[in-house]
């Protein structure tokens, strides 16, 4: 492989968590290979000394794991590392491996491999809790062998210096143990915008670029990488000027406390997605103009029975209270498929994503919807200054729309709308919005259904991309239908949180953008940097592109404004 350590080059992927970071590249280390069977020490070697090396390596592994546990900021990670450290300290494995060195004269690494094999066989036979521990034993085995042979321990690099982590992809278990104080940024060849890597990077606030083909080859361990988690551009060995300029941009602390608008003053509401009273508080602190999506599932998940109306009133009122005088769009229960509920979801569906989910559950349990609307209406009355809008998830027909709007009106909830998440609803929006007062596009599901790609399947990540021109055409169709009745159309899927894509959405006619509070300052900054006409140009470019990658690249190329802002 060509040595790229000192070569300046760029690789582009999909930015999934914004932020600019530069640091030394470390790769996820490869798994340890099995030492050849029968590999023996020569008769001249000191067997006791060789056996002692195993104990030393085990002590070192334990100490490293304990240090990593102390550094971990997440409680769950610390506990996991402490448990592995305790297992590494167990003398049984070491004693057995040492015996194999002294009696069978195996080289220490082969002796450790065989001793660990015996333990894992026993644990597998015992089943249950013990069988689950075999992964840890193999992990400890590999760490001891790595220490004995001078290799890097598999998995995350053992570095005390903060670094840029580069990998083909990250296993969920590995991604979960990432320490945000050590990992400056993540770059992966594979994975996609909805992958585990992307979700965890976002949760931990680590700038990340996924689907950057060729990254592991180009970004050699030891080189310096400059990672832009918004644009998806990664520069290998940037010039000192590039570094300085980029890091200056990353020092800019963006805040938002006002009204979202393009440079020429075209208003676009910047709203937040919230899931409970705590995230509503976070959204209010981030300066959100209101809530564009209040997911109510938190009230219903992990329960055997539905919550009472009183319980619901208390939770909804607590969210509304964070937005006096502002708009809160509350979504009725969206259960089924990826959010099953024991008291509502059929458990014999062959294709749950295509089954009774979202608003469709209202047909099976109309009383549940009625109680929820009653709770929303009561909570709204208690916070009379909050402008409460209600919408139903996963509407696909005009009849569903009419039924939902009528149900809302029974409770005097007069601003009733629908989520556009199914292609049929996008194409029928002219009819749907004759009755519904507004639409909110759920781009996560709209992409899933337009592309026929399960949004949770990492291997289908290339399909699950809201830059897909077909998805953009459906958004455009929704906006055109809404125009016929002068109805507002928001976007509350992940697409709204991407600064470049947000501008495309505005150009398509979207009137509000709702996102996780963390994304608000950047999207608002991007919006303020361009005129509406520019957004419309970008929309034309994106919709006319043949592929998602073409759309993304063409739009980025037409947006030097964002590059200048480090977005
Ligand atoms: C969506 O589908 O885009 C959406 C916002 O809803 P959820 O992610 O909750 O399904
Ligand atoms: Mg959805």
Image (spheres, helix red, strand yellow):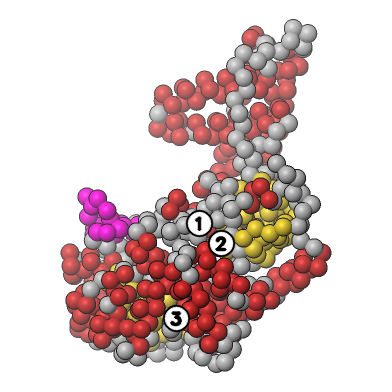
Residue 345 x/y as whole percent = 25, 57
**Residue 202, picture quadrant:** bottom right
- CB contact under 8 Å: marks 1 and 2: yes
Q: Is residue 235 above or below residue 218?
A: below
N-terminal-most mark, 2 or 3: 2
Residue for point 30% across, 58% down: 353
Residue 425 appears left or right of 52: left
Part of the protein shown in magenta: 336-355
Q: Is residue 57 above or below residue 487?
A: above
Q: Nearer the viewer, residue 172 or 245?
A: 245
Residue for point 81% across, 68% down: 241
Residue 65 x/y as whole percent = 65, 40
Mark carried by residue 508: 3
> Magenta includes 341?
yes
- CA gap between label 3 and label 1 equals 24 Å
Q: Secondary structure at mark 2?
A: strand
User: Mark 1 packing: few (<14 Cα in 10 Å), some, or many (20+)?
Assistant: many
- CA gap between label 1 and label 2 equals 8 Å
N-terminal-most mark, 1 or 2: 2
Residue matched to label 1: 192
Can residue 484 be seen in this snapshot?
A: yes
- CB contact under 8 Å: marks 3 and 1: no
Residue 431 appears left or right of 384: left
Q: Secondary structure at mark 1?
A: loop
């Amino acid at each position: 492989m060509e040595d790229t350590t000192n070569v300046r080059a760029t690789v582009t992927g999909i930015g999934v968590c914004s932020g600019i970071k530069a640091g030394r590249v470390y790769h996820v280390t490869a798994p340890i290979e099995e030492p050849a069977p029968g590999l023996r020490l020569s008769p001249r070697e000191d067997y006791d000394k060789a056996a002692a090396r195993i104990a030393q390596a085990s002590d070192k592994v334990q100490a490293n794991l304990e240090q990593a546990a102390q550094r971990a900021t997440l409680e769950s990670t610390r506990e996991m590392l402490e448990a592995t450290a305790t297992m590494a300290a167990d003398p049984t494995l070491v004693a057995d491996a040492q015996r194999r060195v002294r009696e069978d004269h195996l080289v220490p690494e082969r002796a450790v491999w065989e001793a660990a094999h015996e333990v894992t066989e026993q644990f597998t036979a015992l089943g249950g809790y013990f069988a689950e521990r075999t992964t840890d034993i193999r992990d400890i085995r590999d760490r001891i062998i790595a220490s004995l042979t001078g290799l890097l321990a598999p998995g995350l690099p053992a570095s005390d210096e903060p670094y840029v982590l580069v990998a083909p992809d990250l296993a969920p278990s590995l991604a979960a143990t990432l320490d945000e104080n050590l990992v400056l940024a993540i770059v992966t060849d594979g994975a996609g915008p909805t992958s585990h890597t992307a979700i965890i990077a976002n949760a931990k606030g680590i700038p990340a670029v996924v689907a950057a083909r060729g990254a592991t080859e180009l970004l050699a361990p030891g080189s310096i990488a400059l990672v832009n988690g918004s644009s998806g551009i990664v520069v290998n060995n940037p010039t000192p000027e590039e570094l300085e300029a980029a890091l200056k941009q990353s020092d800019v602390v963006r805040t938002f406390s006002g009204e979202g608008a393009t440079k020429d003053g075209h208003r676009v509401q910047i709203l937040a997605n919230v899931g409970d009273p705590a995230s509503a508080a976070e959204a209010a602190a981030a300066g959100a103009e209101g809530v564009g999506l209040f997911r109510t599932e938190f009230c219903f998940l992990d329960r055997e029975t539905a919550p009472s109306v009183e319980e619901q009133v208390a939770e909804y009122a607590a969210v509304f209270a964070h937005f006096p005088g502002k708009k809160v769009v509350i979504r009725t229960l969206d259960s089924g498929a990826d959010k099953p509920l024991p008291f509502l979801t059929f458990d014999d569906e062959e294709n749950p994503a295509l089954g009774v989910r979202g608003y469709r559950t209202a047909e099976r349990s109309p009383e549940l919807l009625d109680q929820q609307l009653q709770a929303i209406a009561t909570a709204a009355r208690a916070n009379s200054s909050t402008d409460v809008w209600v919408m139903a998830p996963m509407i696909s027909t005009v009849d569903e729309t009419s039924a939902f709007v009528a149900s809302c009106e029974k409770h005097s909830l007069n601003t009733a709308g629908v989520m556009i998440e199914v292609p049929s609803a996008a194409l029928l929006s002219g009819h749907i919005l004759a009755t519904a007062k507004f639409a909110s596009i759920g781009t996560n599901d709209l992409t899933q259904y337009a592309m026929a790609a399960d949004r949770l399947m990492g291997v289908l990540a290339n399909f699950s991309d809201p830059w897909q021109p077909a998805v953009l055409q459906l958004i455009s169709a929704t906006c055109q239908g809404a125009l016929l009745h002068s109805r507002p159309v928001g976007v509350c899927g992940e697409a709204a949180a991407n600064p470049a894509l947000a501008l495309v959405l505005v150009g398509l006619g979207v009137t509000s953008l709702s996102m996780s509070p963390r994304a608000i300052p950047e999207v608002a900054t991007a919006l303020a940097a361009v005129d509406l006409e520019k957004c419309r140009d970008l929309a034309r470019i994106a919709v006319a592109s043949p592929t998602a990658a073409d759309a993304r690249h063409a739009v980025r190329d037409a947006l030097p404004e964002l590059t200048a802002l480090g977005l």
